[in-house]
């Protein structure tokens, strides 16, 4: 890395990185949970799970929105020595940093099926869906300002996953075409070769 530059990770990619693992682990845990009668019975478990899913989506989507918006408004332009991290690297770092938490959450969701079938899995899946929606919201902020938002990699913390943590003092911005991820953190669609 050039002197004076920093490694930068896309904010939306950091937010989105946990969505797929949480969603699929939640779906798997809910599927296993439906096979267990549980103390409350399947019907009550699934009904409670549906309510937990909705609550989890709402909580994850709206948590710390003001901080995201404030950091986005005050984003400084990225310097020429800053190094933009690939989308795949950012997602891989997040998943490696959270692998034990993901495993524990999955085991807890499966274990909770003995009390309320499928409820824990649906809660986990709701967290994943909420992260997808939050990443899409960050993408709308980016499109509205016609910029992409980046955060210093060394500010993300030990688990590489807190884009609004205490260590994050500000965001950097680039043009909308920078990097390999579209606004919202999805893979950038490349035009087909003719």
Image (spheres, grey):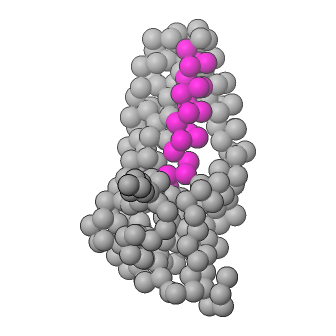
User: Based on the displayed image, in which of its 4 quarters is residue 5 positioned?
Assistant: bottom right
Which residue reaches farthest front? 194
Residue located at (61% from left, 81% from top): 6
User: Could you tell me what secondary structure mostly forms the magenta stretch?
Assistant: helix
Look at the image and tell me in which quarter the C terminus lies.
bottom left
32 vs 11, left or right, is: right
Whether residue 155 appears in this view of the structure is no
Q: Residue 72: horizontal and vertical position, in percent?
A: 38, 72
Q: Is residue 153 left or right of residue 164?
A: right
Image quarter hosting the N terminus: bottom right
Counting from the top left corner in percent of width and height, residue 101 is at 68, 45
Query: What segment is highlighted magenta in the picture?
Result: 15-34
State the residue at coordinates (69%, 64%). 158
Of residue 106 and residue 180, the one placed in the foreground of this image is 180
Q: For the point 59% across and 26% down, which residue is it?
A: 28
Q: Residue furthest right?
A: 100
């Amino acid at each position: 890395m050039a002197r004076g530059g920093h490694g930068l990770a896309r904010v939306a990619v950091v937010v989105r990185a946990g969505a797929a693992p949480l969603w699929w682990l939640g779906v798997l845990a809910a599927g296993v949970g439906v096979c267990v009668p549980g103390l409350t019975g399947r019907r009550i478990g699934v009904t409670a799970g549906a309510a937990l899913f909705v609550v989890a989506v709402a909580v994850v989507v709206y948590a710390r929105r003001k901080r995201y918006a404030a950091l986005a408004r005050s984003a400084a332009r990225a310097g020429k020595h800053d190094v933009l991290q690939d989308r795949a690297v950012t997602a891989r770092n997040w998943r490696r940093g959270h692998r034990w938490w993901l495993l524990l959450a999955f085991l807890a969701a499966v274990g909770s099926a003995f009390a309320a079938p499928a409820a824990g899995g649906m809660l986990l899946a709701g967290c994943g869906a909420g992260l997808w929606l939050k990443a899409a919201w960050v993408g709308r902020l980016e499109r509205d300002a016609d910029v992409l938002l980046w955060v210093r990699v060394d500010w993300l913390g030990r688990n590489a996953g807190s884009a609004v943590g205490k260590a994050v003092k500000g965001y950097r911005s680039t043009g909308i075409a920078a990097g390999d991820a579209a606004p919202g953190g999805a893979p950038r669609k490349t035009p087909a070769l003719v």
